[in-house]
Image (cartoon, grey):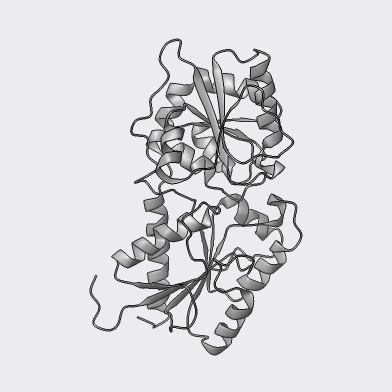
Amino acid sequence: MFFSKPKPTLAISLVPTRSSWGGASPFVSQLASCMWRRGWRVVFDLNRDPDVVLVIDPRRDHRAKRFGLAELENFRERHPQVPILHRINECDQRKGTDDIDELLRRTNALADHTVFISEWLRDYFSAKWFDPTLPHAVIYNGADPRVYHPIGNHLPGPGETVRVVTHHWSAHWLKGYDVYQRVDDIIATGALPGVAFRVIGRWPEEIRWKATETLAPMTGPPLAAKLRECHLYLTASRWEPCGMHHVEGAQCGLPLVYHEDGGGIVEAGMRYGIGFRDDVAGAIRKAIVRLADLRHRLLEQMPSGECMVLEFADTIQRLAVESGRL
């Protein structure tokens, strides 16, 4: 894309990192690449006269976060004509905190447009403070399809062990470790014959795995390769706004076995997965019986990082044009 005046500029509050650091970092990497291809300049501060500002998680609790609520309030006062897009991807219920929802409310009061990463998260905040008549959209997470793809993943052959996998960078119990420990116990007792379980990442120190294959944290192509070796993705994360772990698993060809209190995860699980509340072993057995059908459904409606960033890029461009900045 060619412009008759200087390139339009997008300011993003989060700098992507090479190591895994939640779903926001790979999202920013994908979006920045898309905007660069469209001829935009992408910066990570508010000092270079941006045409649109994208704020993600306004907490200033990490060096990758370059501006937060205080900087945004000052910017809004000085540049009321510059549109602010707020991507909401967090909530207090996810980790039992009590400060995030209020911080997001104050940040959202400055926004011209809001994007929630799941319908569940939109409804969660609509019950608290968000006015759903205001401009907003729901754009579900997607992973980089150059890395997370199903090519090389296969259904298990006759008599082959069915490999179930999960991966998390956080060791917080609400990521589902009570369920993962239960699956480990069930497999160890022989009650799930023909099933193996793999956990990638971190887990609570007090867990002592009995029958589970454990792998250190990894990301990118090494992680995707390990996911494609498996057949089902288990997620027991609770009240997740959306998450990336199950998205990466799904894009590698793995149908979901998901907790019915999984928040935004449920929206994906209902399309190509089996839900559970108390009987995770029963859900795994049911998913194995229906594996070919579930996988077909997944391949027909797989999440996509390309679709995700295109929706964001179109929204950013529209905001800039409607504001008169372009």
Tell which of 27 and 79 is nearer to you.
27
* Apparent side of residue 190 relative to residue 248 in the rendered image (left or right): right
* Apparent side of residue 82 relative to residue 193 in the rendered image (left or right): left
The quadrant in which the C terminus is found is: bottom left
> Which residue is painted at 33% across and 72% down in the image?
40
Asked if residue 251 can be seen in this view, the reply is no
Q: Tell which residue pokes out farthest to the bottom in this image.
A: 78
Q: Is residue 318 above or below residue 308?
A: below
Asked if residue 164 can be seen in this view, the reply is yes
Q: Tell which residue pokes out farthest to the top in this image.
A: 159
> Which residue is painted at 41% across and 39% down in the image?
301
Report how many numbered discs are placed on residues in the image. Answer: 0
The quadrant in which the N terminus is found is: bottom left
> Which residue is painted at 57% across and 49% down in the image?
242
Q: Is residue 169 above or below residue 231?
A: below
* Apparent side of residue 30 relative to residue 213 in the rendered image (left or right): left
**In x, y percent, where is residue 314?**
38, 64
Tell which of 224 and 142 is nearer to you.
224
**In x, y percent, where is residue 266?**
58, 40
**In x, y percent, where is residue 319?**
43, 73
Tell which of 153 and 120 is nearer to you.
153
**In x, y percent, where is residue 105?**
67, 68
